[in-house]
Amino acid sequence: AIKYPHQPRPPKEAWMKWKRLLAATYFGNTRTDMMDEEDYPLYRNDITYTPPRQPSQTWSPPSCAASLAAVIESMPPVWRQIIGNFEAPMDEGAQIAQVLSSGNTVRCWSDGSVSDGVGAHAYTIQPACCGDDQAARGDSITPGHPSSITSNRSESFGAAAICLVALAIEYKYGITEGGYLELHIDNLEVVNRIKFGMDRTMRAEKHTKADYDIWKETVAIMALLKSSVCAKWVKAHQDDAMVGIGPMPMEAHYNIEVDRRAGLCRASCTVPPDSLP
């Protein structure tokens, strides 16, 4: 009997023919094992790969002898806005540079805060087994329209700020082979964007994805680094459930620190975020 969609089920040979036609269309000559002389592409389908992404900003750094703050100050205005209020380590980032140049891991934390259409992000870069006076810190108001800004955007800017500070430290200390930057972020979407990057064959509608601009810029900045960037999810607001229990794990401690700092930065905002460049 003929059932929906009002035709009999195609024979196995027809399915194999359709499979070969799809292979001829989307794989070209790479799947010769599935083609014969009668197979031809259904339509022209030349997949073009996008070129490697370059940062939207150009940077002419000063002499390596300049202070870390001066190196950051020489960056383009958009990058300086991402870094925001920067607190240089007491040793000008020498310990962070030593850890990276030796091929080891520097641990970093960033977080964002959004309320009433205003967003802010904060970050810290901690060299292993060192005091807080050798850590780099900062915060900034997150650019974005008040009607659409999200925590995902502010957290993305925090990750970008860490990469930019690391880029300045690598330049100042002449690092040619870096170590690892381990970013601890409590937003899983941002973690996955850093871990997996951007698909070179991403379809057009994906380029309108929320916060695509900062995602694209962060991926391009990461490509400039000599160090490898990895991301790790950390549970947010662990202090809410650990009151009176005792010291929190290091991952939770610094996550709470940057979360509070981002909140204070947001509360101090006196200008509309969408007016920033």
Image (spheres, grey):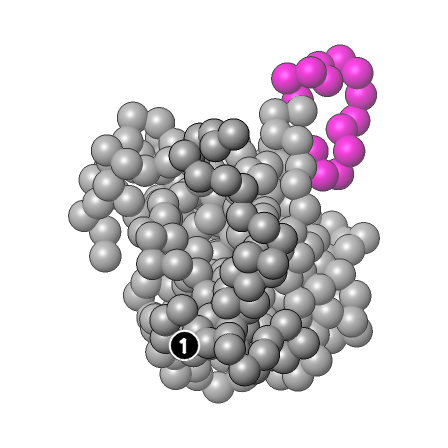
Of 160 and 140, the residue lying toward us: 160
Q: Residue at x 50, y 40 (%)?
A: 8
Asked whether residue 134 is in view, the answer is no
- Height in image: 178 above or below 116? below
As drawn, the residue found furthest toward the bottom would be: 63
Q: Is residue 207 left or right of residue 103?
A: left
- Indicate the amino acid at tag 1: Asp
Q: Which residues are magenta?
A: 239-252
> Residue 4: image x %, image y %?
44, 30
Figure quadrant of the C terminus: bottom left
Magenta region, main secondary structure: loop
> Residue 264: image x %, image y %?
43, 33
Of 185 and 91, the residue lying toward us: 185
Q: Is residue 184 magenta?
A: no
Q: Residue at x 48, y 43 (%)?
A: 155
In which quarter of the view is residue 33 placed? bottom right
